[in-house]
Image: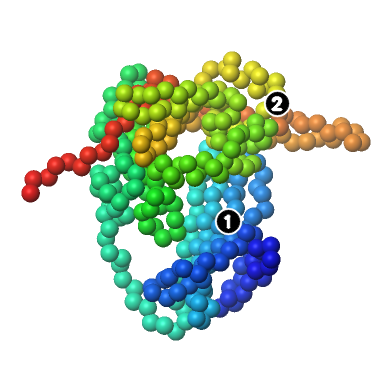
Amino acid sequence: MDKDGVLSGLVLSGDLMFPELDDAEVEEDAVIDGTPMYHVTGIYEPDPLPPPAYQGPQHYGLFVDKETMRLRRLIITSEFSVPGPLGDGEGQRPAEESRMSMRLVYDYFDYNEPVAIELPPFDPCNSSADTKELLSCGRFSQRVYWLGERLETTGSPDLELDGAWINYGNDDDVITEDSRLTVVYASPKNTDGGTSVYLEQWSRPAWDEYLTQFSGFDPGTFLSSGPVNWWQHPCVEEEVYTEANGAEVHLFKAHLLSLVFIYPMTEEQISRCRDEPVRAVGAHVYFEDTVVEFSVEDSVSLGGPPATVSPLGPGSRRPDRPPYPELVVKDRNPYNNVETVRLIAASLKPYEKPYEKP
């Protein structure tokens, strides 16, 4: 590692090669199976994908045995989003954008050491398929909130409890202050996942730390161009009020067709955008030790490929079509309205584990 914190040309046991890593750091307090490790972290910036596709930086974590200098574990995490490819048939449209997180964990045992392979102990907090066992786990630093078994809505299908999962926020799949629980509600008639509401629950310290990483929104760039908050886009209105359940609600009304595909806008477009209807709604609901984040929007797809550029003459070029694919509403989300989002924020309540007779 050089004086600028760049890890390059590193070769460890087994002739394993790694790309040049920026912002490399070494920590010495890591332990795996009782063995002291060097924990080397660094960031690899892959070549950018053509917008609106996005490949985030890859975060490398190397655990190296202090005594033997052998690599014991490698963890690579990244996020990316890509629109589905255009079909070959005439008139086919690309599929909706896929947003995914990647986490690869490699443990190296090929050093002539015997290894016992066995199933890990069952932990209901980490492994249970029972939603209520996750809600009552008890290891989260934040209190868990839900809407009950069923929430009746006006003008939209009722919402029913449909599942939950944990985003650990660390490399060890251990519930910590950074871990978030997502509770899912859906219409009883939901068959394709398109009418679900995802309530992501943060601890207040983790949420505050998250917000320090992102600031503002440059409407002249793509959403995926850097760390930005869609709710700070100039075409999004924010309303702050206090609910009867004690929450401070930040309600966001977006005059944008999509919160996933946000194309660059001109000053003229920005000056007129709030005259357009509200197309997507979201909320950040602040309780004493928990922040519940969620948004609802219609499902959109790309209506055609980006513009091709044709030459007009020496030094002159023009697009054959608008520079970005047209966004087309694919499916309407029945919960995409201000009244339903207000109702969800007002109906959140702490989850209480049912009383069990001794």
Tell whether 327 sits left or right of 206: right
Q: Position of residue 229 (x, y in %)?
A: 55, 36
The residue wearing badge 2 is 266
The residue furthest top is: 275
Nearer the observer, 96 or 235: 235
Q: Position of residue 195 (x, y in %)?
A: 39, 31
Q: Position of residue 94 (x, y in %)?
A: 57, 38
Q: At 30% from the left edge and 67% from the top edge, which residue is drawn?
A: 119
Crowd around label 2: few <14 · some 14–19 · many ≥20 (10 Å): few
**Which amino acid, by three-letter code, is at mark 1?**
Gln
Q: At 27% from the left edge and 58% from the top edge, which residue is drawn?
A: 123
Tell whether 224 sits left or right of 308: left
- Visible residue check, residue 170: yes
Q: At 57% from the left edge and 41% from the top edge, which residue is drawn?
A: 214
Q: CA distance from mark 1 to mark 2?
A: 32 Å
Q: Position of residue 235 (x, y in %)?
A: 59, 24
Q: Quadrant of residue 187?
A: top left
The residue furthest left is: 358
Tell whether 293 sits left or right of 51: left
**Which amino acid, by three-letter code, is at mark 2?**
Thr
Q: Quadrant of residue 89?
A: top right
Q: Is residue 189 above or below residue 101?
A: above
Q: Quadrant of the N terminus?
A: bottom right
The residue wearing badge 1 is 58
Q: Quadrant of residue 91?
A: top right
